[in-house]
Image (cartoon, grey):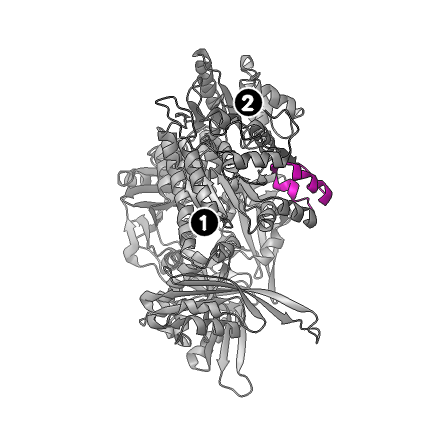
């Protein structure tokens, strides 16, 4: 019918005259038509184009439900004059152009008749000039990638936008990338419809656009648009055998399907080119299945891909090559050697293998379920009897629901498209505010509409009556400071936020502008307000543990000196002046721990409160709620908040005596240690596997800190040492040859000169660099004797600490295990360098996972006899180990990942670390820890201490660990000793 020379206008006129057939297919009567999700998406989108044509809309349809044909049907049914379709890849562009060319499916089901001509098509694959863009006027549908449009000059892009009536975006979860933003902004005001199977991003950026239709994955499964999904797990903890175990199971399934008459292919997924090459060597033993390797660096890719489509290869080893844009229904078996971390990618990946075809069987996935490290939302996929159909349905529903809830929250903001624009900017304000007491009758958010001021105009404003929140963006023009002219001006965009906590009648106001702008905004949103300032502001410092004052401003009642600012080191004088009444607090910024996690707090006498952080608006609101509780708590005495603050003394002349513990700088937390490496003389170690030993004094002004790693025999090996020299007014670190990768390589001593090690002293103080930090409340704390518990060690060889792989029952660790085993469901032998504790004992009760860390130490022999006594040297090392383990608080699944990693690596050496329980139980707890509380306790086991002879020196060292652990975790410690 299209054998004549036709034009864009001929096609468009045929669409105008065409009556689209909105008929639903009926499998019972074999009546062809559109699928249910296609028809519903069309109705929803056509309605949207009538009611809100300029607002970006999102259509959610799972992979395999006919999304592409829905897009094409919408173009015809809505009679779109000229549509630009954006796709994320060249492969998708080619596939879409071929799909649109003849509208075969839409014609086959009777939705489009012969009256409607096939569209004229054009594809953009490179930069174009304005003249070349003009030639695209012959097309009804233009398909492009954002990468190609990114090369366009502004004039060429403007020409393309003016030419097109509508914008469609396929695989819209990519749309927040910078390359997409330019096109979306250029099309602002024109109809924009986004299609995606996964309307969420794992990078936390917003996918703008209201979800106008969502076809749940649950419905797609019930309606038969998804084939069944079989999961065939293997469980192999030995890393050397894991890949072969997966390959054996996957090939077994493929052979069975081929024998049953199914024309199936198998995909082998790898995370990198190197992994793919290694895996190809494993699969290359199955020559009758003609395995092939395909990734971006393989030569003759086009020929290889063509052979794959022709089914010349039954096994395809790839690196993310067969995802979006690749449609091969015969791909029905997946051997997953490296898991996708992201739910979005996982759902897309699974969807590729579940397309319905009567000639094909169900999709089959093979993976090793031992020690999976996926996103916790996808962890359920890798359980023993996982129902993958149910899991992906549930994960998809939760995440789509979250996006819809976010959209609903945005919908609570009134006034057209302003909320969409504001949230599309992904505002990340500094976490700061000034708080006011405001009665409900004086809260007037609607008056914020009058925010215009001199040289400042209101650009966007949204008011959420339900959440009592106002967000506004203004544009302000100011004269430049270096010229007396109005010819040139600076332009600044300002953000205003107000949140009203009705329960406590407290208003929080934030602005990126100055105080004058903040006051004008305040007077609009509140008729009458009273600023919370003065001493009550300092209540925000309440309950901060190990609080260090970073900078303090003081107001002084002297004519010659009204204000002084103090930074870091002169904190002692600051506190003294406040306590003596020589000065009053003007502003304070401090660091410390709250709820076991690091935090920062800032507050000023004028009423400003802040946190050294920038976060999304919803975090700012939750922060305001927390601060509101403190500000309104009259039981908090602002005069008391500094009693627990850490004082600072400069170390001069010589290092103080009694340093017994060293650890890495505070800047290196567990999350960082996993990504940081230490390099020395050709060897590389993960920071988690490197420990620092007890400081040694190499003279009055030099400390020597051993750097310890595991030796080849499983014992301790001294890798090198770190020397710290005390200077006249500073310190210098030296560790020749050692380098840190964090993430860039640099000498370790240079890093430690900027970020000093943390050293503990027996009196409870901490040394960092050439300064000693201490709190009066934690100085010279002796361990309460009531926390000592004596055991009868019987015939135990208390001079032997470790069970070792052979599980020596007569060692300190072995006896401890026998003593505690019945109280726990899991007991893990973590002994060795990089340990969390010698024994990790775990039990579960309701919604709490109880984790007790047992740190064991031996009793040294004197003249062939191990005799408990009062030697202070016997407690230094074990107290250091206990203090070090407190860093595992609040690490969640990283804690369990660490245990599983050490378990797997030890198996290679025939060392089974699980003394009680199973690795499956650990995996279950790793999954549960995301919604279960983790309750840590710390136990020191040292039979060298005699309960009858315990010395004050021993109790002092134990008291230092006790105070340190309790201040961070809130937990007591228990010390197991000899009678």
Q: Using the image, determine if residue 606 lies above or below residue 116.
A: below
Nearest the viewer among 365 and 59 is: 59
Label 2's element? strand
The residue sitting at 49% across, 63% down in the picture is 472
Q: Residues within 10 Å of mark 2 (few under 14, many from 20)?
A: many
Label 1's element? helix
> Could you say where residue 768 lies in the image, as x and y percent from the top left?
52, 60
Earlier-in-chain disc, 1 versus 2: 1
> Could you say where residue 722 lies in the image, as x and y percent from the top left?
58, 51
The residue sitting at 59% across, 71% down in the picture is 455
Q: Residues within 10 Å of mark 1 (few under 14, many from 20)?
A: few
Which mark, residue 51? 1
Q: CA distance from mark 1 to mark 2?
A: 48 Å
Q: Which residues are magenta?
A: 125-152
Q: Using the image, determine if residue 483 lies above or below residue 957.
A: below
Labels 1, 2: front one: 1
Residue identifier under label 2: 316
């Amino acid at each position: 019918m299209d054998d004549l020379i036709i034009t864009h206008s001929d096609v468009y006129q045929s669409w105008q005259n065409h009556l689209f057939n909105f008929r639903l297919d009926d499998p019972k009567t074999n009546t062809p038509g559109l699928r249910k999700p296609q028809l519903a998406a069309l109705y929803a989108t056509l309605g949207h184009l009538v009611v809100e044509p300029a607002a970006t809309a999102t259509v959610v349809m799972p992979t395999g439900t006919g999304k592409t044909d829905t897009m094409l049907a919408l173009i015809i049914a809505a009679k779109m004059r000229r549509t630009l379709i954006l796709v994320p890849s060249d492969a998708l562009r080619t596939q879409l152009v071929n799909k649109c060319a003849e509208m075969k499916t839409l014609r086959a089901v009777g939705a489009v008749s012969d009256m409607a001509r096939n569209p004229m098509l054009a594809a953009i694959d490179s930069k174009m000039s304005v003249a070349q863009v003009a030639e695209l006027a012959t097309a009804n549908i233009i398909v492009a990638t954002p990468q190609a449009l990114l090369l366009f000059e502004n004039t060429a892009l403007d020409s393309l936008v003016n030419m097109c009536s509508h914008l469609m975006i396929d695989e819209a979860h990519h749309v927040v990338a910078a390359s997409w933003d330019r096109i979306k902004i250029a099309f602002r005001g024109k109809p924009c419809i986004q299609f995606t199977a996964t309307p969420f991003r794992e990078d936390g950026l917003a996918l703008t656009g209201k979800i106008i239709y969502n076809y749940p994955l649950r419905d797609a499964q019930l309606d038969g648009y998804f084939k069944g999904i079989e999961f065939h797990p293997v469980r192999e903890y030995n890393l050397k055998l894991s890949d072969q175990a997966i390959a054996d199971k996957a090939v077994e399934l493929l052979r069975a399907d081929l024998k049953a008459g199914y024309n199936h292919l198998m995909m082998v997924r790898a995370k990198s080119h190197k992994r793919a090459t290694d895996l190809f060597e494993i699969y290359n033993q199955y020559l009758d299945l003609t395995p092939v390797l395909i990734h971006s660096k393989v030569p003759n890719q086009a020929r290889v891909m063509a052979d794959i489509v022709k089914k010349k290869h039954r096994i395809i080893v790839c690196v993310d090559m067969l995802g979006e844009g690749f449609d091969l229904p015969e791909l029905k078996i997946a051997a997953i050697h490296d898991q996708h971390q992201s739910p979005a990618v996982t759902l897309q990946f699974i969807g590729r293998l579940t397309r319905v075809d009567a000639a094909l069987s169900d999709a089959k996935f093979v993976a090793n379920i031992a020690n999976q490290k996926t996103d916790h939302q996808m962890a359920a996929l890798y359980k023993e009897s996982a129902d993958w159909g149910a899991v992906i349905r549930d994960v998809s529903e939760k995440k789509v629901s979250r996006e819809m809830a976010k959209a609903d929250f945005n919908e609570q903001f009134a006034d057209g498209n302003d909320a969409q624009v504001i949230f599309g900017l992904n505002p990340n304000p500094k976490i700061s505010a000034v708080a006011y007491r405001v009665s409900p009758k004086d809260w007037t958010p609607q008056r914020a509409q009058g925010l215009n001021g001199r040289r400042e105009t209101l650009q966007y404003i949204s008011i959420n009556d339900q959440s009592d929140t106002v967000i506004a963006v203004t544009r302000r023009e100011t004269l430049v400071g270096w010229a007396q002219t109005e010819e040139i001006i600076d332009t600044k965009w300002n953000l205003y936020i107000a949140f009203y906590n009705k329960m406590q009648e407290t208003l929080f106001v934030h602005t990126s502008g100055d105080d004058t702008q903040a006051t004008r905004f305040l007077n609009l949103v509140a008729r009458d307000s009273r600023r919370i300032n003065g001493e009550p502001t300092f209540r925000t410092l309440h309950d901060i543990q190990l609080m260090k004052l970073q900078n303090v401003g003081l107001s002084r009642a002297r004519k010659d000196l009204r204000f002084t600012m103090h930074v870091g080191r002169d904190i002692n004088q600051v506190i003294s002046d406040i306590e003596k009444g020589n000065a009053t607090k003007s502003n304070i910024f401090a660091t410390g721990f709250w709820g076991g996690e690091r935090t920062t707090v800032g507050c000023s006498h004028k009423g400003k409160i802040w946190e050294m952080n920038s976060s999304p608006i919803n975090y700012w609101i939750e922060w305001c709620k927390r601060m509101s509780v403190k500000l309104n708590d009259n039981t908090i005495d602002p005069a008391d908040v500094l009693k627990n603050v850490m004082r600072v003394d400069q170390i001069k002349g010589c290092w103080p005596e009694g340093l017994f513990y060293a650890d890495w700088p505070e800047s290196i937390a567990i999350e960082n240690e996993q990504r940081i490496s230490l390099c020395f003389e050709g060897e590389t170690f993960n920071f988690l596997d490197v420990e620092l030993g007890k400081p040694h004094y190499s003279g009055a002004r030099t400390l020597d800190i051993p750097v310890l790693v595991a030796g080849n025999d499983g014992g301790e090996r001294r890798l090198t040492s770190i020397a710290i020299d005390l200077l006249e007014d500073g310190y210098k670190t030296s560790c020749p040859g050692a380098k840190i990768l964090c993430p860039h390589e640099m000498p370790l001593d240079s890093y430690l000169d900027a970020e000093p090690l943390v050293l503990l002293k027996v009196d409870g103080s901490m040394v960092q660099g050439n300064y000693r930090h201490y709190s009066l409340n934690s100085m010279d704390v002796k361990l309460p004797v009531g926390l000592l518990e004596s055991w009868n060690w019987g015939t135990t060889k208390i001079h032997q600490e470790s069970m070792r792989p052979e599980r020596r029952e007569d060692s300190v660790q072995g006896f401890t295990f026998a003593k505690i085993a019945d109280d726990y469901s899991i007991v893990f032998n973590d002994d060795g360098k990089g340990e969390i504790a010698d024994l990790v004992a775990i039990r579960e009760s309701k919604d709490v996972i109880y984790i007790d860390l047992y740190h064991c130490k031996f009793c040294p022999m004197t003249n062939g006899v191990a005799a408990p006594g009062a030697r202070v040297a016997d407690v230094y090392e074990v107290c250091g180990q206990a203090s070090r383990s407190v860093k595992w608080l609040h690490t969640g699944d990283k804690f369990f990942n660490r245990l599983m990693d050490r378990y797997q690596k030890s198996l290679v050496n025939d060392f089974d670390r699980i003394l009680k329980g199973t690795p499956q139980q650990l995996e279950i707890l790793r999954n549960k820890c995301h919604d279960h509380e983790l309750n840590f306790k710390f136990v020191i086991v040292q039979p060298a201490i005699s309960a009858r002879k315990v010395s004050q020196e021993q109790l002092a060292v134990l008291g230092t660990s006790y105070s340190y652990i309790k201040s961070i975790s809130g937990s007591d410690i228990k010390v197991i000793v000899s009678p």
